[in-house]
Image (spheres, rainbow, N blue to C red):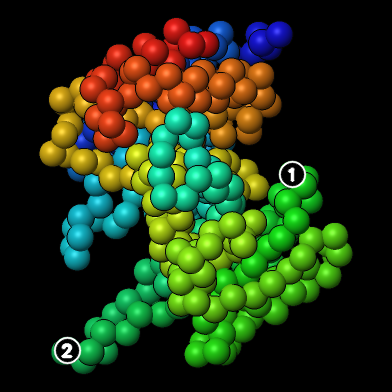
Amino acid sequence: MTNTKTHKVTLIPGDGIGPEVTDAVVRILEATGVKFDWERFAAGAKAFEKYKEYIPKELYESIERNKLALKGPVTTPVGGGFSSINVTLRKKFELYANFRPIKNLPGLETRYPNVDLIIIRENTEGEYVGLEHEVVPGVVESLKVITEKGSTRIAKFAFEYARKHGRKKIHAIHKANIMKMSDGLFLKCAREVGKGFPEITYGEHIIDNTCMQLVLNPYQYDVLLLENLYGDIVSDLCAAFVGGLGLVPGANLGAEAAIFEAVHGSAPDIAGKDIANPTALLQSAVLMLRHMDESAAADRIQTALEKVYEEKKSLTRDVGGTAGTKAFADAVIAAL
């Protein structure tokens, strides 16, 4: 039975196709009977037009209150402009674990069937601390920061997840042959944590070799534990196994708060045309429901989504169908 509690959730529709896919997902979530109280906020360029801030104070306060947010894609300018909204929010709320499950949807043919990988990425450190400066004209220095606290925390998250969900293998991915101190510390912490989980096989692979091994045979991996930059790259690479970034979910998790988001871009070229695929944000919302202890609703949406993919009648054009965003959402609601 669905519980009668109303869940307060901060909603960031984003820009480009963000508002369309967000509306579709909100309709599907509400069709489960779970009660939501959405607090909607703009972020990025849209927010700047309205509040003269890229992340309005009210948005920070909403996440602080609710401890939970669902976020559509937000455009990040390349090479200039404002800082990434994603990175800023992760730092602000100490969302240290980026969690991305990579799993095929039924009926959708890809080069790699039956992939089932978990990517766990450290989300607050490494090159993404954003400490860059010009030493002298023409020479820029960028600092990579790895801490024992951050590395231990993400390793614990990975091993505890593996134990809870019956996963058998964790590989820590690194470049400690070159970055002996920083990546060396990351590995040292992972090994230490691993000692407390004797039932889980622990391995280490160098990042460049890992990329090759993944393309050769993704089935040799189970859970991948990565630093921030490596995790960002490898999670996109792995998304290709199951059909691309338009399909895979993402969660940013911390001790106090969690933000669930689609990891694809805002695709301004197709915005407003009712052709965007809401699957990535919908699967992120399924992760959010599990986080909220609404597992029954999560299972129902996942089953309905898989049914729509299996039937192939109401798929969006990026996955070979002809349906629009709204029609796809209608089909998932009907399958509920």
Q: What x and y, as percent, mark residue 203?
A: 69, 72
Mark 1 lies on residue = 165
Mark 2 lies on residue = 138
Query: Closest to the observer: 27 or 49?
Result: 27
Q: Nearer the viewer, mark 1 or mark 2?
A: 1
Q: Is residue 77 above or below residue 207?
A: above
Q: Which mark is residue 118?
A: none
Query: Closest to the observer: 81 or 35?
Result: 35
Q: Is residue 79 above or below residue 281?
A: below
Q: Which quarter of the figure is the N terminus placed in? A: top right
Local crowd size for mark 1, using a 10 Å CA cut-off: few (<14), some (14–19), many (≥20): few
Label 1 is placed on what type of residue? His
220 displayed left or right of 80: right
Q: What x and y, as percent, mark residue 129?
A: 43, 68
Q: What x and y, as percent, mark residue 116?
A: 58, 47
Distance from Cα at disc 1 to Cα at disc 2: 50 Å
56 displayed left or right of 8: left
